[in-house]
Image (cartoon, grey):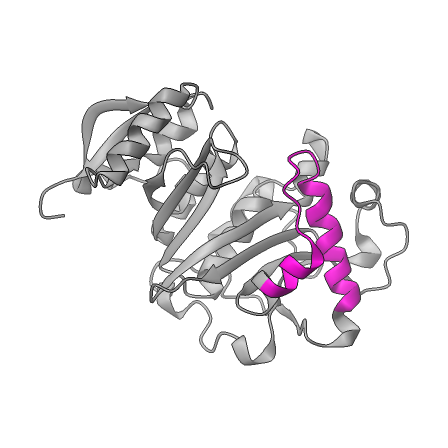
Amino acid sequence: MNKLSSHPRLDWLDYSQVRPYVFVREDLRVQNPGSLFKDNINWFDDVEPLWFNPLHQKQVEYSNLILNLEAKAFAASGLGMDRWVFYDCAVMPGFVAGFAHKTETLPQFMKDALGVDEIKREWTPISLFIVIPTMKPGEWFAHNLCSVNSLLDRKDKFYGLGFLTKAFGLWYANIANCCGATQWKSPAVRLHALYGDFELLTTYTPTHSYSKTITYRLDVKPQRWEKFFWPEPSDTFEEKFIKTGLQINPEDESNLIHWQNELEEKKGPFYLRSHEILSAPLSGPYNIYSPKAGS
C-alpha cells in the first residue's frame, strides 16, 4: 500500500485531479524512473506522470503557465527566471517536473493566486522543480523549487506540495547526489535538509546575489522522507556523524564567514542535522557535525 494515501492531510492528492508532470525533451527522458530507489520508497509507483515535450511549439502555453507560477512565487525575492534562463539552463540541459491540477476543477482561489483568468490547457502546473546535471558524474544541482502554496492563505495550501514536488523529481530522475543553494533564515532550509545527509559547501556566498546564501550537497536518502509526514521513524544520523560542539549562527555574518573560511581551508566536511533544523528557530544557531572516522 502507498502510505501517502493514508495521510489525513494529503486528501488533495487525488491522481484523477492532481498528477505529477515531466517537462523534458524527448531525448532526455528517464528510461527507468525511480529504479535507483525501488527498495526505499513507493510513493509514486502507482501513477503515470504527464509528459510534455518543451521543444514542441504546442507546449508554449504550458511553458507560459510554469513561468507565470515561478515569477509570482519569486516576485518578492527578485529571483525569478527570464525565459531564456528557463530554456538555456533548465529545458535544454536539465530535468523539469512538478505537479499539475486538472484545470476544470482547479480551485478558484488558485486561479486567483496565479492571476490567470482563462486557462486553455487540460492541466495547470501548481509546482515546479528544476534540476541540472553538473560536470561531476552523478551529481545534480537543484536550480528551482516552488509551488502555488507560497501564494495562498494558510488554510488553502496543499499540505506537503513543495516537499513532494522535489521528492518526485529526485525519485523519478534517480538522483543520488544533489546540490542546491538557499538563503539562511529561509524556511526552505528546513525543507531541503530532510532529503538526506545535508553537507555544507558554502556558508557565505558573495558570488551569489545574496551573500548570506548556503550551498549544500545532499546524499539523497529516500528512507528518511517519511519524517516530513510521519515524525516517528528512527533517525540513523548519529551512526555516521558526531557533534563537534560548535555552532553556526545565521544571524552573525562574521560567523558565517568564519565557517566559510574553515571550508576553504578544507577543515570540513561539515553537516547540519535535519530534525534540529526543524525544531530550531530559522535564526538558528545550528550544531555543526562531522563524519565519524571510517563512516
Q: How many marks?
A: 0
Q: Is residue 129 left or right of residue 232?
A: right
Which percent across, then down, holds residue 236?
24, 42
Q: Is residue 103 something that shows in the picture? A: yes
Vertical position of residue 30 compared to residue 109: above or below? below
Residue name at image x 90 percent, y 55 percent: 118
Could you tell whether 269 is left or right of 33 in the image? left
> Residue 163, relative to residue 283: is it above or below?
below
**In-front residue for pair 128/229:** 128
Is residue 157 visible in the rendered structure shown here? no
Q: Main secondary structure of the magenta part?
A: helix
Tell me where residue 135 appears, x and y as whole percent: 38, 65
Can residue 87 be found in the magenta stretch?
yes
> In the displayed structure, does residue 129 sit left or right of residue 78?
left
Name the outermost residue toward the bottom: 27
Residue 134 at x, y = what percent?
41, 62
Magenta segment = 60-88
